[in-house]
Amino acid sequence: MMAETEAKTRFRPKNGRHRMRKQRPITETVAIQSWLRPALTHVGANKDFALFREQLDGVDALLTGSHLESMAMDFAQAGYEEASVRQQRARKVFALKALRVETLRMLLGNPAFRPFSRTVASSDLMADFCGVRRIDGIRGISKSVLERASKFFTADQVRWMKQVLIEMCGEADRAKEVGLSASVATDVCLVDTTCLEANIHFPIDWVLLRDVAATLLKGTKLIRKAGLLQRMPCEPEVLARQMNRLCIEMTHTRRKEDAYKARKRVLRKMKPLLRTIAEHARRHRDRLESDYSQTDYSQAQAAQIVGRMDRMLAQVPAVIFQAHERIIGERPVPNDQKILSVHESDPQVIVRGKAGREVEFGNTLLLAESTQGLILDWELYRQKAPAEWRQLQDSIERQNAFDLSAPIRAAVCDRGFCASAGKAQLQARRIYDAVCPRDPAELRRRFKEPRFVRLQRRRGSTEARVAIFKQRCAKRLRCRGFANRHLAVAWAVLGHNLWVIARMFEKQENVPKAA
């Protein structure tokens, strides 16, 4: 794996559309050669390992044959044209590592960086795939390196690589270069939406007060441990113990006859305690900002502590107001003003109406797949998502922004995407409308069309595709902040498509040859 690679092909937008075209030869081409390394350890009588190794071999061939490695090196060089050859080579080597490391992490189910680092370091096969295995051992695979590699590319760059992979597999000539015997059909678009849950606990109003208090007290303890002391009536651990006792008391109020009055009584004790904790934390925060040079903390470490405490201090009035309105005032708070987590500000309240999951907390994720399981388009909405028929039109526009070998000829969705305005736009684009209608009489009429019946029957597998994608790659992302989750979803889509195409290689090998 990791054969000699050169950055020869560039992919740039032209006239607002992404095109694949050859550029003039680059005067300073940096060759990336594979490191000298011993043979892999032989593993016998293990079918699962053999299948996994075949998948990695297929993904390795895809990364090289579909020009993804060349694109990664081009992205690494962008903005660093004036740098020295040595610096450019270092960035390109790290770009190849970042591409392969993130691809492998998504193939393994998106584990955390620390266990993933141990897994790669203990496997010759995975380390060889990532390009970190040499004759002198495995190096350059620590959790910090993996975290930097996950953020080396932007979400738009990863989306671009995904689109180039689809175009390579969608054209007959280029599909042979990749290794496919036949091109992948991309003319039918099956669209569905789901909720990408945020990594937060269930949003309970009084628990938010505990979360703010715990974070502020942790920062206060770090500052006091560094030697910067401010007057306090007791240690931070005592205040944390008092808050925990009130939380336990609040939990047990539900078993009392006057539960509503008991909850109000406990909340009236939690509010002044949180204000006291916030005042002590603010004085320690100011002391650290002015006298961090007297501690062992660097300026970046002190800024990290100060920034975390500032975020919590800014939310103290808001969480107290929300808990007061809902518990003491017994007044509802609008969803757009509701605080779901003190650590994440972007999750939305999504009413799904499903059995066992009436409401979910996260962001709306749209997925558009092909009939063969490739994800053609995706979008993660930061704010409240628009109507589903508008999401469909936006998805079609994003896909039309690329030079598709086979333009979209049919759109297949469930009844949630049905709207008169959406039908008119599909008709104007000359796209076959296979959206399930809401009207039962209209549905009975459409069931007389063989093509509509065939596409709607195929749409049932789209629910399974969404489940596969979430379980393998993005069930509940651990990364903080919407930008990091958006980037993680882009990597998950790219890794999913590489996995699907690698499975196509296995099916080709199992096809019996004609006599």
Image (cartoon, grey):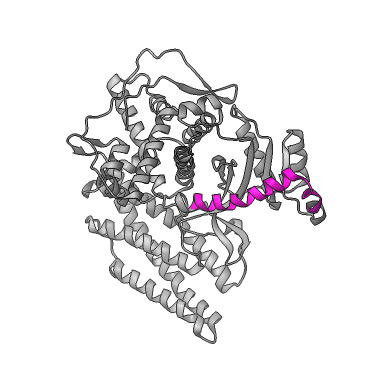
Magenta-drawn stretch, dominant element (helix, strand or loop): helix
Magenta segment boundaries in residue numbering = 444-470
For residue 407: magenta? Answer: no
In the visual, does 246 lie left or right of 172?
left
Q: Nearer the viewer, residue 244 or 149?
A: 149
Report the number of discs: 0
Query: Where, by quadrant of the figure, is residue 104 drawn?
Result: top left
Direction bottom: furthest residue? 257
Q: Where is residue 223 drawn, in percent x and y?
A: 27, 56
Q: Identify the residue at horizontal 24%, vertical 29% (top origin).
A: 35
One can see residue 150 in this view? no
Q: Nearer the viewer, residue 479 or 302?
A: 479
Q: Identify the residue at horizontal 37%, vertical 63% (top origin).
A: 214
Q: Nearer the viewer, residue 371 or 299?
A: 371
Direction left: furthest residue? 136
Q: Where is residue 407 drawn, in percent x and y?
A: 65, 31
Which quadrant of the rendered structure holds the N terminus? top left
Q: Identify the residue at horizontal 61%, vertical 30% (top origin).
A: 401
Q: Where is residue 487 drawn, in percent x and y?
A: 46, 42
In the visual, does 280 lie left or right of 257?
left
Q: Identify the residue at horizontal 37%, vertical 12% (top origin).
A: 27
Q: Where is residue 377 drawn, in percent x and y?
A: 57, 39
Q: Nearer the viewer, residue 368 or 339?
A: 368
In the visual, does 303 lie left or right of 445?
left
One can see residue 193 in this view? yes
